[in-house]
Image: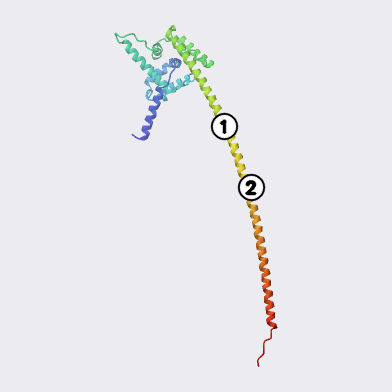
Amino acid sequence: MGVSTKCVIEIKIGIKDRASRAKWSESAIKALFSFLFEHKNKLEELKYTRGATSNPGNIQLWKDAEAFLLTFNFENTYSNIQIANKWKNLVDNYKTQLAESKKSGGPPITIQYKEEIEAILDKDRPTLNPKSCIDSFEFSSRNEKELNFHQENLVEKKQTETPCVIPKIGRRHKNKRENDDTDTNFDNQSKKKSKKHGNNLGNILQHWIEQQGVRQIELDKRRKEKEKKEQDQRLELLHMKQQSDMMLFGILNNLSNSLNSLHMKKNQVNQVNQDDLNDLEFPQFD
């Protein structure tokens, strides 16, 4: 196995692990049911689409589902691969629980999301209003225009489909909603704490920047003082050198004058001696 093939396999495994670890809220699951019900014919066509299971990232239906879920202010965002894997897991769980419930002698089993999944998988079966599957709390921040658009589509579907009976909201759904409200309050508190920590971090960063500015000003001041001191020292050395040169020039000038005076005296002495020699009379011999 080459290095490139191994890297591709590790990347695919990492993507699959991240998709399986995606945290889905109850409202996000109900929103996914709503979308799949509206597009259950396209979902049926995926059974005959090559590569729909092995490579869900290239399927347009899951890309549209990703865009649909992004229109809501859910705490988490979900990619097309995560959405495809979530639907597969829901169906697998439904089939497992359905097989368990058919076994004789066992206690009754409540199949989770039974009505919603059966309504989506059976295209000819009358179903619940998908809008009622979604928690109204999560939809409070949805764009009003988008809600009206989906509501008109649902009205058109109701005119062509058999009317359905909306099940009563039981204690379990009420408890789930209370849990969602508790989770929402906890998330809001966490966001406030995160914002407070962010403000503290901003203050610390601002204080550090101010300290760096003061430190830079002090360093510039010390640098200028050092440069001025070095310049004064250079001027002083230059002045001392000029004085030394003048003293040396004076000494050399005096020495030159002394040598000239000595040379003149020597010449005078020689001249006197020569004159004395000329004045002397030497005896003449015949």
Left or right of 244? Residue 133 is left
Mark 1 surroundings within 10 Å by alpha-carbon count, few (fewer than 14), some (14 through 19), many (20 or more): few
Q: Which residue is mark 1?
A: 209
x and y percentages locating residue 66 in the rendered image: 46, 21
Identify the residue at the far left of this view: 105
Q: What residue does disc 2 label?
A: 232
The amino acid on which the numbered mark 1 sits, given as a three-letter code, is: Ile
In the displayed structure image, the side of residue 175 where residue 262 appears, left or right: right
Give the CA separation, mark 2 to mark 1. Answer: 35 Å
| Callout 2 amino acid | Asp
Relative to residue 238, is residue 96 drawn left or right? left
Residue 149 place in picture, x, y as percent: 51, 15
Q: Residue at image x 32%, y 12%? A: 100
Q: Quadrant of the N terminus?
A: top left
| Rendered view: 243 above or below 12 | below
Q: Which mark is residue 79?
A: none
Residue drawn at x 53%, y 25% is 198
State the image coordinates of residue 209 (x, y, percent, origin top left). Answer: 57, 32
Q: How many marks?
A: 2
At 64% from the left edge and 52% from the top edge, which residue is drawn?
A: 238
| Residue 154 x %, y % | 48, 12
Question: Mark 2 Cα within 10 Å, few/some/many (few <14, many 20+)?
Answer: few
Dot 2 or dot 1: first in sequence order is 1
Q: Secondary structure at mark 2?
A: helix
Secondary structure type for disc 1: helix
